[in-house]
Amino acid sequence: MYYKVKVTDHVRLPPTEYSTSTEEAIVGVIKKDYSGLISKDFGLVIDVAGVDSIQDGIIIPEDGATYYETNFTLLTFQPELQEIILGKIKDITDFGAFLSMGPIEGMIHISQAINDFVSFSKEKQLQGKETKRSLKVGDDCLGKVIAVSYKDINNPKIGLTMRQEGLGKKEWIIDDLTNAKKTKKK
């Protein structure tokens, strides 16, 4: 899920930035400090959405920089448990598939890819034994977040499933809906 997060911080503006307007320089420093930051509190920071207010600056002796208390808004991405996410299969390995969810990737274990016995082929595809459904790089899919771990803050782990009804490749979902309508008519 994407969020706008309000933050208050003391932004250090070095003397090399004094030739630029204060707001422009502060936005540059905030982008440098926060873009790409990963935090348990607000997920992955995508960008600075805007600066809300900048207080008067203070200079600390022997530093030369000016510090501004600044209120700003960050655009963040934080996947939540049970959230349904649309993404594209980026890679397939013998243990599962990786789904690109915008700024981050999630992993679909081979046991969670297809509601069937699944095998891995040399062509980097996952194939269902009975359903004959296959998953390959570039497929658009819907996955459900089943695990989120920030144990390694520089490399968060997102676990996904596509085994439930209404998940997986778009073609699978359409087939399931068509079959459900046929069954209901009988």
Image: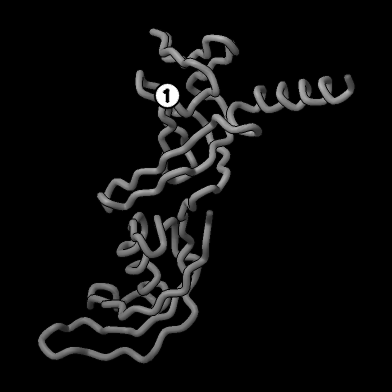
Q: Position of residue 96 (x, y in %)?
A: 40, 25
In the picture as drawn, the residue positioned furthest to the left comes out as: 62
In the picture, the quarter occupied by the C terminus is top right
Element class at badge 1 = helix
Q: Residues within 10 Å of mark 1 (few under 14, many from 20)?
A: many
Q: 176 or 14, which is in the foreground?
A: 176
Residue that appears at 40% across and 55% down: 44
Q: How is the image coloured?
A: one colour
From the viewer's perspective, is 59 left or right of 94?
left
Q: Above or below — where is 30 with respect to 66?
A: above
Q: Position of residue 94 (x, y in %)?
A: 35, 18
Q: Quadrant of residue 147?
A: top left
The three-letter amino acid code for the residue at tag 1 is Ile
From the viewer's perspective, is 53 left or right of 64?
right
Residue that appears at 43% across and 12% down: 119
From the viewer's perspective, is 186 left or right of 170?
right
Q: Which residue is mark 1?
A: 110
In the picture as drawn, the residue positioned furthest to the front comes out as: 186
Q: 30 or 37, which is in the foreground?
A: 37
Report how many numbered discs are placed on residues in the image. Answer: 1
Q: Quadrant of residue 166?
A: top right
Residue that appears at 68% across and 28% down: 173
Q: Above or below — where is 25 with respect to 84?
A: below
Q: Position of residue 164 (x, y in %)?
A: 59, 33
From the viewer's perspective, is 105 left or right of 131?
left
Q: Above or below — where is 61 with respect to 4?
A: below
